[in-house]
Amino acid sequence: MRLGRWAWLLPLPLLAVLGLFLFGLGELVWSSFAGPEGFGLDRYRQFFARPDYIDVLFRTLWVAALTTVVSLFISYPVAYFVARYRGRKDWLLVLIMLPWLVSVVVRTYGWIVILGNRGLLNEFLGWLGVIDAPVRMLFNTTGVVIGLVHVFCPFMILAILAVFLQLERQLEEASMSLGAGPVETFWRVVLPLSLPGVISGVMLVYLMSTGAIITPLLLGGLRDRMLGTQIYQEMFQLFDFPKAATIAVILTVTAFVVVLPLQWLERRVSRNLKGAA
Amino acid sequence: MSQTDTLLAIDRVVKTFGSHRAVDGVSLDVRRGEFLTLLGPSGCGKTTILRMVAGFEHPDSGTIAIEGRPIQGVPPYRRPIGLVFQNLALFPHLTVGENIAFGLRVRRRPQEEIARSVDEALALVELSGYGERRVHELSGGQRQRVALARALIIRPAVMLLDEPLGALDLKLRRQLQLELKQIQQRTGTTFIFVTHDQEEAITMSDRIAVMNGGRVEQVDTADRVYNRPSTEFVATFVGDTNLLSGRVAQAGDGEARVSVPALGRDVPAPAGSLRAGDPARLSIRPENIRIAGPDAAWRVEAIVRDVVYAGAAHRYTVEAGDMRLLVAAPANPGTAPLAPGQRIAITWAGADAALLAASAA
Ligand SMILES: Nc1ncnc2c1ncn2[C@@H]1O[C@H](COP(=O)(O)OP(=O)(O)OP(=O)(O)O)[C@@H](O)[C@H]1O
Ligand SMILES: [Mg+2]
């Protein structure tokens, strides 16, 4: 490569983007502290003084946690299956990523068709005779969690799969040759060795769930707002930018309260696994 | 050998992958306490046999029995086997001690017993004091020993070792060969050891099973495999040899004579199952060909073409008739080696050669 003396130009676009991002972030944080009566925590006090906002905050954490846990339980077996699949894995990967070729909005509408009071699922359950009256699965927390799980599962699967693909099959065979049955091999070998992938998947999905907007907007109830939709509302319906900034900062801080310990844990686990595979 | 001495019996086992016969009708009796080596070129089915004994692959036909009981359908975790993989497969999330303790933990042994056994196992493989280390802090040779200790601690009836020394450098390899053999003798465990290194097989084994293309060609002591190969493949795979094609001219008891067109004469060979007129191959090791003295019973003229000094012996390439032969002669400090171009006569004792049926190819 003969870039010569122009090579220093290459990082410029990256620096520009980074600069813009940092500027925006700084502006955001600053505006959340700057009030009409000067610099201070006023906006934060106002936020925490309102029970409905506290509700929104806790609903956000709850939905994110639920989404993460459900995604984990769905993704873990899928990732394991893909990793151990003897045929062509690339097709399975395409299948997993396929939903991403469709816009989130369209997919979310798909869920409305399925989960609605007269949706496919309720009709089916009614036809089976399992239920008499339709189960509310839409415009409440259930709907949001279902929608979010659908959107974020591929990330969780890929995060866990990345670890499984490096996991030598012979480790499981070694465990079995030492007398451990399949269940015991899972608990003693497979699970501990896949923890780094589980933790990164959990962090990823948790972070994305706390900040979700479109899915809760479309599938959540009017009263079941989340922090993301609240910010959206403050900005685009009420044009209260400083309040939106305050909520955004609160959202970021609460997310990090969960993610930082996870990150510490991941580093610890990974260090223990050094030299794996 | 009486029947009771057989610990592991492999009987006419066939295993195909797709259309490829990886194991093509192998029968093998492994005796209690013996060190048996599966020796053969890459892809001949050694690993597949071990994996079938361990229970990770299943024979298409044939049976495998341990202590006379067929183990078909017994899952790997209920078979009395210990396994050492080529890549060792140590658990990276566990310490050395925890790796070794694994088999006992799974068996829910009491804590004190586990601690004691682990200490003993560490001592056995000369790693006392390494129990707290993490696996990635060990050298290749040390990891090797951990893998061995981990498998031995469950006191398996049969230890299966799949080229466990393959990744080590030559010096360490030699040292571990000795240690492995000593450990095997001290514990009295039956070892099935896989290698494609014939020297390794010869130094370590009580018996060697030489494999080729999914079949066992010969099962014998190292000495007999080397000196009494029963097929052409065994003769060429184990050590260097000269192969002479010809026809059995005369078959008596004790000695036969084979006419070798390339040499233009009959040469002596040990009597075998071949009859006069049968096509045959004669295998004669380089060190069994001697420079003919005046009292030699027979001789053939030859010209020295090439000399290589190889440690304790000179290795000559000589031309005799229409063929080239390898000759190894001990290096005598007193006498000068033969020089290229020198005319000599060579001979060998019929009993030192091996008479083999000519292979179809
Ligand atoms: N799971 C499998 N699927 C398909 N083919 C296989 C499988 N395992 C082994 N084979 C084939 O079976 C043959 C024997 O393999 P095996 O691993 O037993 O050889 P090996 O003697 O152990 O060789 P090496 O010395 O290289 O380890 C090879 O041709 C291999 O390609
Ligand atoms: Mg192999």
Image (cartoon, coloured by chain):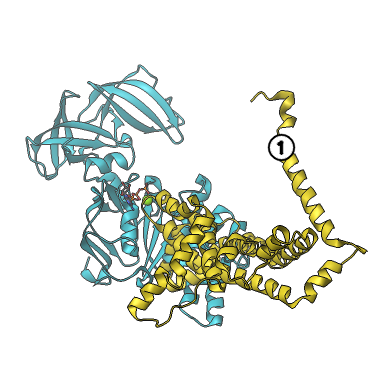
Chain colours: A yellow, B cyan
Q: Tell which of A78 and B99 is nearer to you.
A: A78
B147 up-or-down from B349: above or below = below
Q: Is residue B244 above or below residue B3?
A: above
Q: Position of residue B88 (x, y in %)?
A: 48, 57
Residue at image point 84% right, 57% down:
A30
Could you tell me the amino acid type at mark 1? Pro
Residue at point 16%, 23% (across, down): B264
**In the rendered picture of this protein, how many numbered marks are placed on residues?**
1
- Local secondary structure at mark 1: helix
Residue at 38% x, 49% y is A88
Residue B209 or residue A121, whichever sits in front: A121
Chain to which mark 1 belongs: A
Up-down: is A7 above or below B207? Answer: above
Pick the front one: A40 or B206: A40
Q: Position of residue B180 (x, y in %)?
A: 46, 59
The quarter of the rendered structure image containing the N terminus of chain A is top right
Which of the 4 quarters of the picture holds residue A126?
A: bottom left
